[in-house]
């Protein structure tokens, strides 16, 4: 059998997608990845075949830098980072305004490229990133059965009366004005309608007999894969999803890092891991407050600083480990707490390791994910722009107590969740789901 994986040119997307492919590789089957040049080394690292496919203007090989983006995309990134400094609603409104050019890039041309790749590769199964709308148009219009995977919080696929881009939930610590929320919802609804018209226009060009969509953001493939634990998803919302499989997590294998292993072995103090991912590491101001909050606690800290220069973080204890990149999965295995922006890879990998979280959500589905962690008792959320050093320290202390208290109900439930996620990996769940259904129509 042959599996075709279609991914945007972003490391944060390709790592979990490629991890799913390892189940096919371990079964002795062929895996082909269609993605852009920035992530070519990741495909090689996994040992898969590669087809060139550029799904959008931007790219991210691991840490995104404005100056490395093409003209236009650099200004868009600056605008996004500026919006995160203004707050939740401004960020979501900025993202809504950019949605058509971000998510439906050259749809007809890319759709036809995807069809040519399918003709060459002749896959038995296809997994495509849910946000790769242009690629999904190519598969849909050609009648190629496929699974699409939501790599973020499941709210990235709106259900019922939900509107894409308007969080169905957010942590109680965020209290935007009702008037701001009303404007955000109106804007998201207008974007939905415009986006759907663009989707239908491209679909007509690709297949004049295709049924038009009422809401392109609610479209999904023959099988919906959710890279998220079912245990964290509200049952009422689960009942509204199309046919689906919760994968739990797609935790990747990492090469042994001698420096990290030596650091872990050098001291017995509890480890706290800090990362704002490949995009939000640019928020040095928030990272600096996290550093100040943790400095007074009896812990050692590993910080994946990304694009932030460590000199911007103030005085750092000599025992701390600070690098642009760190092996996140390995460090979470040894951590008692993680401080995160709430990206889905960070959340699901922390849950698999049984690590509670302090979450500072900035954008998109991070708000819904943070709310779910708060509700489960596995995390505590704070607004990144206004949380003080004292607020952050208190939140970290609270989660450290939870981590150490084996008798606490949330601790026991987190341990149960971690056991479930490690007993059957996301890759194994995906393989079981997809090899039961035909892949080509």
Image (cartoon, helix red, strand yellow):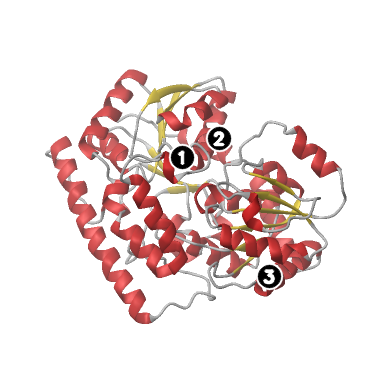
The residue carrying mark 3 is: 395
Q: Earlier in the sequence, mark 2 or mark 1?
A: 2
Q: For this rendering, which residue is in front, 226 or 319?
A: 319
The residue carrying mark 1 is: 60
Q: Helix or strand or loop: what does disc 3 sit on?
A: helix
Q: Nearer the viewer, mark 2 or mark 1?
A: 1
Q: Helix or strand or loop: what does disc 2 sit on?
A: helix
Would residue 196 be seen by someone viewing this image from the given angle? Answer: yes
Residue 329, given in percent of the width and then of the height, sits at: 66, 43
Left or right: where does residue 21 sit relative to residue 358? Answer: left
Q: Earlier in the sequence, mark 2 or mark 3?
A: 2
* Residue drawn at point x = 71 percent, y = 45 percent: 331
Residue 34, given in percent of the width and then of the height, sits at: 40, 28
Residue 19: which numbered mark, if any? 2
Q: Nearer the viewer, mark 2 or mark 3?
A: 3
**Distance in Å between CA atoms under marks 2 and 1:** 18 Å
Would residue 364 be seen by someone viewing this image from the given angle? Answer: no
**Distance in Å between CA atoms under marks 1 and 3:** 31 Å
Number of residues whose C-alpha sits closer than 10 Å to that of mark 2, classed few (under 14), some (14–19) or many (20 or more): many
Residue, far left: 208
Quadrant, the C terminus:
top left
Number of residues whose C-alpha sits closer than 10 Å to that of mark 3, classed few (under 14), some (14–19) or many (20 or more): many
Q: Quadrant of residue 221?
A: top left
Are the residues flagged by discs 2 and 1 in contact, CB closer than 8 Å?
no
* Residue drawn at point x = 55 percent, y = 67 percent: 384
Left or right: where does residue 71 sit relative to residue 32? Answer: left
């Amino acid at each position: 059998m042959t599996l075709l994986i279609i991914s945007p040119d972003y490391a944060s997307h390709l790592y979990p997608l490629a991890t799913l492919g390892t189940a096919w590789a371990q079964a002795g089957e062929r895996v082909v990845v269609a993605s852009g040049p920035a992530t070519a080394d990741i495909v090689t690292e996994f040992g898969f075949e590669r087809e060139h496919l550029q799904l959008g203007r931007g790219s991210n090989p691991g840490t995104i830098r404005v100056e490395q983006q093409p003209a236009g995309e650099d200004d868009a990134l600056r605008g996004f980072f500026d919006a995160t400094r203004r707050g939740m609603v401004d960020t979501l409104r900025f993202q809504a305004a950019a949605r058509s050019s971000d998510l439906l890039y050259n749809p007809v041309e890319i759709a036809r490229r995807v069809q040519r790749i399918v003709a060459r590769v002749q896959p038995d199964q296809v997994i495509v990133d849910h946000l790769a709308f242009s690629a999904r148009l190519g598969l849909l219009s050609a009648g190629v059965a496929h699974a699409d995977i939501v790599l973020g919080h499941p709210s990235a696929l709106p259900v019922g009366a939900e509107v894409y881009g308007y969080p169905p939930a957010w942590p109680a610590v965020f209290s935007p004005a009702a008037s701001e929320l009303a404007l955000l919802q109106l804007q998201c609804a207008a974007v939905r309608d415009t986006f759907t018209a663009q989707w239908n226009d491209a679909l007509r060009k690709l297949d004049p007999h295709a049924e038009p969509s009422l809401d392109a953001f609610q479209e999904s493939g023959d099988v919906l894969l959710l890279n998220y634990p079912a245990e964290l998803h509200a049952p009422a919302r689960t009942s509204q999803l199309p046919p689906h499989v919760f994968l739990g997590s797609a935790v990747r294998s990492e090469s042994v890092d001698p420096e990290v292993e030596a650091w872990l072995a050098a001291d017995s103090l509890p480890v706290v891991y800090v990362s704002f991912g490949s995009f939000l590491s640019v928020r040095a101001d928030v990272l600096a407050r996290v550093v100040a909050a943790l400095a007074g606690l009896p812990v050692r800290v590993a910080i994946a600083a990304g694009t932030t220069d460590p000199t911007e973080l103030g005085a750092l204890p000599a025992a701390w480990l600070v690098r642009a990149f760190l092996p996140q999965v390995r460090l979470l295995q040894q951590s008692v707490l993680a401080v995160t922006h709430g990206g889905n890879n960070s959340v699901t990998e922390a849950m698999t390791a049984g690590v509670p979280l302090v979450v500072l959500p900035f954008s998109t589905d991070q708000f819904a994910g943070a709310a779910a962690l708060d509700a489960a008792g596995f995390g505590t959320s704070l607004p990144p722009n206004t949380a003080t050093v004292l607020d952050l320290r208190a939140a970290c202390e609270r989660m450290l107590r939870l981590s150490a208290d084996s008798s606490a109900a949330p601790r026991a439930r987190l341990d149960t969740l971690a056991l479930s996620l490690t007993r059957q990996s996301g890759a194994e769940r995906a393989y079981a789901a997809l090899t039961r259904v035909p892949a080509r129509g």
